[in-house]
Image (tube, rainbow, N blue to C red):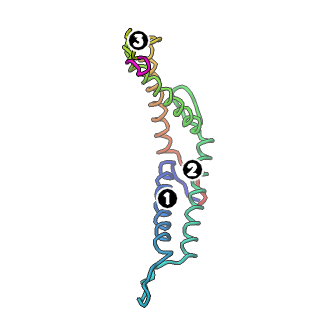
Amino acid sequence: MAKMTSAYANKLLKQLGEDKEFWSDKENNSCLYTAAVGETPVVPDYNYSEVTATIAEIDRKICVIKHAINLANVTSQIQVGKETMTVDTVLVAMAQKNKRKTFLDYLRKQQPKMRKELQAYNMRNTTPEYQYINYDLDQIKQEYEKVTAEIMDMQLALDKHNQTFEFEIPL
């Protein structure tokens, strides 16, 4: 058993991913070799059983660590503002709020009145067309700031949790 934080576990996952990539590259580059007729071949250092076992062990560790992170995320609760939420709920809510923030950002960048460009199919009509917003721009700006602050609160609570909360991983 190893005890670690989510932040450390994610760094370990990255390292394991790099190790797996090393061994996979070694296998891809060493499993075949070319030699001319009459030439003494230069045979790369490659042992199928060793490489396969090493990659399988790395994959096993990745599965165990990801499962432990997932388990910690669905059982650990953190305080976000006045609300207590599980980590997995915070992650889902942050994704939802980020999507909403993107749309609010689009809305807040619109001009109250804007002339529309003439379309190729509408070149005969020379009457200018205008596009108008159908909402209160100040309200959108306030909502954007509110959603941005909520995302920041969630991210800070999540960062603190990921750096301090330890859980066990059965490596």
Q: Where, quadrant-wise, is the N terminus in this rendering?
A: bottom right
Give the side of residue 26 with respect to residue 127, left or right: right
Residue carrying label 1: 17
Q: Residue at x 58, y 52 (%)?
A: 66
Relative side of 98 to 123, left or right: right
| Disc on the earlier residue, 1 or 2 | 1
**Image: magenta residue range:** 117-122
Q: Residue at x 47, y 25 (%)?
A: 103
Count of marks overlaid on the render = 3
Which residue is nearer to you in this view: 130 or 148?
A: 130
Q: Identify the residue under disc 3.
A: 125
Look at label 3 and name its amino acid. Answer: Asn
Q: Residues within 10 Å of mark 2 (few under 14, many from 20)?
A: some
Was residue 94 drawn as part of the magenta stretch in this picture? Answer: no
Q: How far from the left and from the top, in percent, is residue 43?
A: 45, 82
Residue beneath disc 2? 167
Residue extending furthest toward the top: 127
Q: CA distance from mark 3 to mark 2?
A: 68 Å
Q: Which secondary structure, mark 2?
A: strand
Q: CA distance from mark 1 to mark 2?
A: 21 Å
